[in-house]
Image: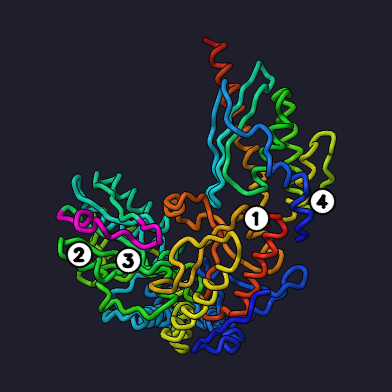
Amino acid sequence: MSDARTFSSPLDTQSVRADFPILSRVLANDFPLVYLDSANSSQKPRQVVAALEEHYLQHNANVARAMHQLGAEATAAYEGGRDKVAAFIGATNRDEIVFTKNASEALNLAAHTLGASLKPGDEVVISEMEHHSNIVPWQLACERTGATLRWFGVTGEGRLDLSNIEELINERTKIVSLTWVSNALGTINPITSIAEKAHAVGAVMVVDASQAVPQFPVDVSTLGADLLAFTGHKTVGPTGIGVLWGRYDLLASLPPFLGGGEMIEVVRMTGSTYAPPPARFEAGTPPIAQSVGLGAALDYLAGIGMDKIAAHEQAITAYALEGLQTVPGLKILGPTDTVDRGGAISFELDGVHPHDVSTVLDTRGIAVRAGHHCARPVHERFGMQSSTRASFYLYTTPEEIDALVDGLGFVRSFFKVD
Amino acid sequence: MQLDSLYQEIILDHYRSPHHAGLADPYDVEVHHVNPSCGDEVTLRVELDGDVVTGVTHQSVGCSISQAATSVMSDLVIGKQVIEGMATYEKFLELMQGRGNVEPDEEVLEDGVAFAGVAQFPARVKCALLGWSAWRDATAQALAKKEGATNV
């Protein structure tokens, strides 16, 4: 068993957990669920599900185009979600919030619209620690336009290698697109100072905030980003909705992404004109109930306080880093202290493949992720094919970390790697 | 969800010392298959003599189930006619998709019967099939190549 170690958090985790019925489930062989996969998808509190239910059962209709009373209610509910998102991330203008189906679509939207003006000789800069969603759309944009894709490397400690930043971000750079918090390494990147470099050469700064928005307070008015993407389902919200925030003047200068209903001004057979943002980027029936659910999710997080959630995340990550490092043969991928580090810890266990680690933990009710976590290049950087990842959120308890550490001891004995 | 039914000793033995591991020459076709959701990768070479599988060698990175299944698969198909190997695959596939309700035929599947427990772990079935999919692909290509050469 793990030794009792000190743990202190400003959150009352037990009362938080009462809002998440799934966390009380008991799985096969009477093991209680230990959910350590929140960086993959977070669980949902009753409040979010209640908001979805209320919307579908009482206010459901299409938005904008429906001229009846329910249509007006649904439109108000959908647009109310936009107001809540804007307030949550510090956007001064609600029209800067574009709803997409997920963060991947938000980044693809950015790559298609911003990328449309790229030319041969132009450069796009990303990093080796990106999620595939922030690699592949830019590879495709560069293939379409003849622009060149370049990237920051990653240091042995799992930090962005900024040693060649002066050369990497230069007068040819048109777009810099980086993750704020690495989903595999947990590293928090210095977005504001990199954005300054990008702006100094006239480049646009795109930020993948999928792992940031759930974990700590975000203020786009001071961050330095020009575009920022995140997803609803990692912020205790529903699946099926993502967000692209953009500076209004930038959004207004971009061409449409998908064509269809509601994104137009006037359609003639000879050509069309397009609506201003955000409608320009929201073709077709949008994720209406999901906007309502996301609004309820952000209300829930704001009600607890993102500063407290961030402090809890730090405390539980510190506790986990300490506990994991007591497991013989375990190597952490990424920073081993909590400085500029988020709440996802990937590791390898000597002699046992990550799939086998996760299967054995799963039989003890412990849910982790195994594989390359949609970040194959950073695994390759560390000479690894895959890893096991444990990730934490506002409902994670130190007892669950203890269960993980004990479970890893069992994995080692089961595979006889002692 | 019983661990011992998944990780039978036979599987762990094949994992620790896989048969026919290490790519060998000569060969007719080499393929590289990946499991994109988890990152398991296998490179596999096939050599045919007429319609008989004379050689299968492989090099892979992956979990115990995928490595052991590739090892067992190699044992099962080497020396057999292609059509027999494909029939064995069908039996193995049936076992994998049987959710634990299929009684494996040891005459046909030999060490492959040890994978019966995998069928109860749906997330791991694809691990057990990776090597087989590589072998089927490589063999189909090798046959097509020989046919093409005969027709010239």
Residue B101 - label: 4
Q: Which residue is mark 2?
A: A197
- CB within 8 Å, label 1 to label 2: no
**Residue identified by numbered label 1:** A356
| Disc 2 chain ID | A
Marks 3 & 1, CB-CB < 8 Å contact? no
| Mark-to-mark CA distance, 3 and 2 | 14 Å
Amino acid under label 2? Lys
Closer to the observer: label 3 or label 2?
Answer: 2
Q: Quadrant of residue A356?
A: bottom right
Quick check: A345 left or right of A273?
right
Spatial distance from mark 4 to mark 3, Cα to Cα? 49 Å
In the image: residue A57, left or right of residue A120: right
Q: Main secondary structure of the magenta part?
A: loop
Query: Vertical placement of B1 versus B33: above or below?
Result: below
Specify few, some or many for label 4: CA neighbours under 10 Å numbering under 14, 14-19, or 20 or more.
few
**Magenta segment:** A154-171
**Secondary element at tag 3:** strand
Sooner in the amino-acid sequence: mark 1 or mark 2: 2
Asked if residue B106 is positioned above or below residue A110 in the image, the reply reads: above
Bin the neighbour count of mark 3 within 10 Å (Cα to Cα): few under 14, some 14-19, many 20 and up: many
Is the N terminus of chain A in the top left, top right, bottom left or bottom right quadrant?
bottom right
Q: Measured from the top left, where is residue A252 in percent x and y?
A: 22, 67
Is B119 placed left or right of A295 in the picture?
right
Residue A221 covered by magenta stretch: no
Snapshot quadrant of residue A339: bottom left
Does the magenta run of residues contain A159? yes
